[in-house]
Structure formats: structure tokens, C-alpha cells
Amino acid sequence: MKRVAWALPLAIVLAATAAVSAGDQDFTLINKTGLTVDELYLSPSNDNEWGEDVLGVDTLADGAKADIEFSRKESECMWDMKIVDEDGDAVIWEDINLCRASEITLFYKGGRPTAQIK
């Protein structure tokens, strides 16, 4: 398990799966949480470390989207994603098959984070 301060229970809603060539983990992240995402971390599911903030000094405002690109040499398909919002709260999604995802939309409804993966 990765080192985190805390995480909320999650529900991942799989809407549609787009076939993407193996090894291609690029996707578009859409923020519809009602909050600003200050930090975004991605890590292979079998890794115990998060690594660096993918957004760097940028943030992802509510309603905004960001294209996340990987090195073409990357072969891992199963990834975990952690966001940290403007309040410093962390939310984690585990075991996302990025080789089969082209778009991930984040939601926060009724106090519960969800993601729609296409």
C-alpha cells in the first residue's frame, strides 16, 4: 500500500472502455469535483511510492481538463491515482487500467468521490 495521510472510500463507475493500443497510457483528466485539484500523483499499482506531482506548479480548476502523457517506453497498464484538493484532502483511485482508458472524469457528489472512465 502506498504511503498516504488518509483516503476516502471510492466508487469507480466504468462507463465505456475505449480500446487503446497496449502500452499507451495517455489520457485526458477532467475535473468535475467542484474543487480545485492542487496535486496529481500517478504510480504503477505494484509500486509503493507516489513519485512527483504530475501537475507540477499548475492546478486543475473545477471544469478544467488536462492531457496526461506517458513515455512511449512505459509498458505498465495498471495504475493508481491520487489527487490532493485545495483543502489538502487526498483521494485515491486504485487499479485503473490506463491502457484501456482515454478519458477520466472525476466527480464528488454526496460526499463521495467517483470517477467515470471511458
Image: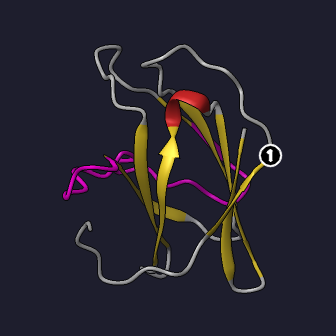
Q: Quadrant of residue 39?
A: bottom left
| Residue at image point 19% right, 57% down | 49
Q: Is residue 115 above or below residue 74?
A: below
Q: Is residue 2 above or below residue 25?
A: below
| Residue at image point 28% right, 15% down | 73
| Residue at image point 22% right, 72% down | 3
What residue sits right under mark 1 in the picture?
Answer: 15
Q: Is residue 61 above or below residue 7?
A: above
Question: Magenta stretch: dominant SS?
Answer: loop
Q: Amino acid at mark 1?
A: Ala
Instruction: Tell me if residue 61 is in the magenta stretch.
Output: yes
Q: Position of residue 57 (x, y in %)?
A: 35, 51
Q: Position of residue 14 (x, y in %)?
A: 73, 49
| 21 relative to 44 in the view: left or right | right
The chosen color scheme is secondary structure
Q: Position of residue 28 (x, y in %)?
A: 61, 35
| Residue at image point 80% right, 46% down | 15
Q: Quadrant of residue 12?
A: bottom right
| 108 relative to 89 in the view: left or right | right
| 15 relative to 44 in the view: left or right | right
Mark 1 surroundings: few (<14), some (14-19) or many (≥20) residues within 10 A:
few
Residue range (magenta): 44-66
Q: Quadrant of the C terminus?
A: top right
Q: Quadrant of the N terminus?
A: bottom left
Q: Is residue 10 above or below residue 16?
A: below
Q: Secondary structure at mark 1?
A: loop
Q: Position of residue 4 (x, y in %)?
A: 29, 75
